[in-house]
Amino acid sequence: MQTQIYRTNKVFVPGGLPKLTYNPRNSLELEKHLQKANDNLCKLVMVTGSTKSGKTVLTKTVFDKGKSVWFDGGAFSTEDEFWNDVADQLDLSIGESNTQTEGSTNSIAIAAGVQTSLFPIKGKIDGSKTNGTTNSNSITKTAKRSAKGLVIEALNERQTPLVIDDFHYIPRESQGNIVRALKAVIYEGAPVIFLAIPHRRLDAVKVEREMTGRVETIQVPAWEAEELCAIARVGFPLLNLKVSDTIIDSFASEAIGSPHLMQEFCRELCLTNQIEETVTTELVIGTASMDELFKKVAVGTGKIMFDKLSKGPRQRSDRIQRTLKNGQQTDIYGLVLRGLAELKPGMERVDYEELRTKMRDLTEKPPAAHEISRVLEHMSNIASSDESSTPVLDWEKEDRILHITDPFFAYYLRWGIDITPR
């Protein structure tokens, strides 16, 4: 019999720290490996994993924000702001003032019965008298130390863990400066942890060659179906819901290895059935229209970025419209995205030639290879410069490789746009 009442939003927490449905994936021993950073490891710890793969939740579980310094690389503005932000979290005072007193004192003491040759005095002096003058000047000198210097000193002394989430979003030049500044901290054994997407895991070594051999990589792999199912099988009973294995398995199949999406599906199922908290009588959910649920989630995830990429960069003239074989019309940006939608990619790199083949299947007049490459480059720039979201794709022009870096975007390509009947 269910006695504890839980709120649905506390059970399923997409994008947050799901305390009730957190899956530590014990067989991988990820927490154990991450804990080594606290044991005088003297290496930079690089936690890598796809966007929304759970690497941030994992790291927060081991390095609590209340006892660590956290910085979001996606919010990076300037290096000075980075060091100032860390200094604030360490409660450091950047300006220090010292007050010094400078002056002089002159005094003359004349005792009873004393004749001095320096001052002619008539007669005998009875008693004693002291005459003196004091000059004193108070001078305040301010010694202002840089935030960077104070932070390095404090991290060395306190051994406070420093975590930089989304390190790959920081500009390459600034990455190098930050890594070089933190070398001494790392060598002294203070925990320094960077979080990054897999194909950018070596950025720290590339910007600072002396870090070769000084990086400990912890890879957070894509979640297996059974690991994702565990989220649902723990969460639904807390709400007194009995959900069929068919539904749970379909959630795991469409989650693209992302616990974030799995949490999203579970919560949406609850909202669809108007479940806001634990029900008093067990509710059985055996069948449901999954297509409508998946499409609804898609609209709330990747549509904004998809629309921005569809528009492409501003230009003076109108783009050439291309007619698709299904009768629709679109420009080259829409055609590239529809080619991706045909591939329905997961969280893996997309083969350039395979993408071109799909585009040729969609229209009688496909664009030339250099046009496609130019569009992918523009899309990558739009994604990386967008302030409201994280980069969803990354085009490596030299290697002709397209990386889909965000499962929400990959998911939207599957469910948010229909090119051919499913």
Image (tube, grey):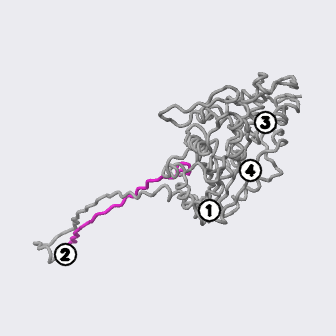
Q: Residue at image x 70%, y 29%?
A: 325
In the rendered structure, find residue 117 and report the number of the disc placed on it.
Answer: none
Q: Which residue is mark 4?
A: 220
User: Callout 4, which amino acid?
Assistant: Val
Q: Residue at image x 64%, y 46%?
A: 65
Q: Nearer the viewer, residue 368 or 350?
A: 368
Which callout, 3 or 4, points to the residue nearer the camera? 3
Which callout, 1 or 2, points to the residue nearer the camera? 1
**Quadrant (top left/top right/bottom left/bottom right) for the N terminus:** top right
Rendered position, 197 above or below 333: below
Secondary structure at badge 1 equals helix
N-terminal of the pair, mark 3 or mark 4, is: 4
**Neighbour class for label 4 at 10 Å: few (<14), some, many (≥20)?**
some
Quadrant of the image occupied by residue 201: bottom right
Report if the CB atoms under discs 1 and 3 are less than 8 Å apart. no
User: Callout 2, which amino acid?
Assistant: Val
Q: Which residue is mark 2?
A: 114
Is 270 on the left-hand or right-hand side of 65? right
Disc 1 and disc 3: Cα gap in Å?
40 Å
**Neighbour class for label 3 at 10 Å: few (<14), some, many (≥20)?**
some
Disc 1 and disc 4: Cα gap in Å?
22 Å
Q: Residue furthest front?
A: 364
Q: Which residue is mark 1?
A: 186
Q: Residue 234 placed where, x, y %?
A: 83, 37
N-terminal of the pair, mark 2 or mark 3, is: 2
Rendered position, 87 above or below 226: below
Q: What residue span does the magenta drawing correspond to?
A: 87-115
Disc 2 and disc 3: Cα gap in Å?
107 Å
